[in-house]
Structure formats: C-alpha cells, structure tokens
C-alpha cells in the first residue's frame, strides 16, 4: 500500500502492476477497470510487490527472477 492509500497489485498473467485507489476507505469493489501503473517493459510475470523506503515499488519477476523498481506518480 502506497503512502497515498493506493493499493498496488501484481497481475502475473497480464504482466502489469495495477492500482486500486482509496483502498483503505473504499466501500465498493473494483472490477476490471483498475488503472495500470506499468506493464511490459522490464516486467516479466511479476509475482510479488513490496515498497522501498523511498516509496518506489519493487516487483519480483517470476519468469527471469529479476527485481524491477517502479516509481509511482507523485500526487500532491
């Protein structure tokens, strides 16, 4: 979960990191309309995510074992 209350989800099959806004306070489910933070590129079937101390998202790839660092947008 990001500092702004956005939940980041690794979607292995779709090879992307999805964003679920207002995850702490939302009262409705999220359908397939989630926003994509990033897809493709260095991602290679991301399995797990964690937050780095600087707020970036670290994704671990299933297919090649590499870790990928992604900077979420800064919301002011």
Image: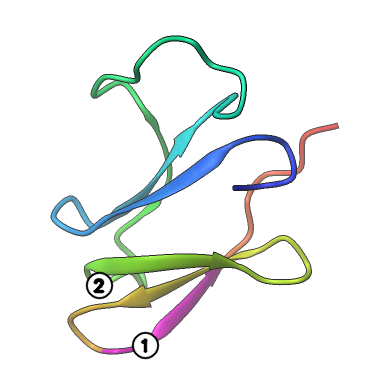
Would you identify the image quadrant in which residue 54 lies? bottom right
Residue nearest the viewer, comparing 51 with 18: 51
Local crowd size for mark 2, using a 10 Å CA cut-off: few (<14), some (14–19), many (≥20): many
Q: Is 42 situated left or right of 76 in this image?
A: left
Residue 34 drawn in magenta: no
Determine if the magenta segment contains residue 68: yes
Range drawn in magenta = 65-69
Q: Which mark is residue 76?
A: none
- N-term-proximal mark, 1 vs 2: 2
Residue 44 placement: quadrant: bottom left
Residue 19 rendering spot, x and y as whole percentages: 46, 38
**Which residue does the numbered mark 1 point to in the structure image?**
66
Disc 1 to disc 2, how far (Cα)? 8 Å
Whether residue 1 sits left or right of residue 48 in the image: it is right
Image quadrant holding the C terminus, namely: top right
Q: Residue at x 61, y 19 (%)?
A: 25
Circle 1 Cα neighbour tier, 10 Å, few/some/many (<14 / 14–19 / ≥20): some
Residue 23's x, y, as percent? 54, 29
Residue 12 vs 18, above or below: the answer is: below
Q: Residue at x 13, y 55 (%)?
A: 13
Q: Secondary structure at mark 1?
A: loop
Question: Which residue appears farthest toward the right when viewing the image?
Answer: 76
Vertical comparison of 40 with 32: above or below:
below
Q: Residue 75: image x %, image y %? A: 77, 34
Tell me, for residue 44, which label it has, or none: 2
> x%, y% of residue 58?
53, 71
> Is disc 1 in contact with disc 2, using a CB cutoff of under 8 Å?
yes
């Amino acid at each position: 979960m990001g500092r702004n209350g956005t939940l980041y989800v690794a979607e292995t099959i779709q090879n992307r990191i999805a964003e679920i806004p207002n995850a702490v306070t939302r009262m409705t489910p999220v359908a397939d309309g989630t926003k994509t933070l990033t897809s493709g590129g260095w991602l290679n079937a991301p399995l797990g995510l964690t937050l780095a101390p600087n707020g970036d998202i670290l994704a671990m790839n299933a297919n090649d074992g590499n870790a990928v660092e992604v900077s979420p947008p800064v919301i002011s």
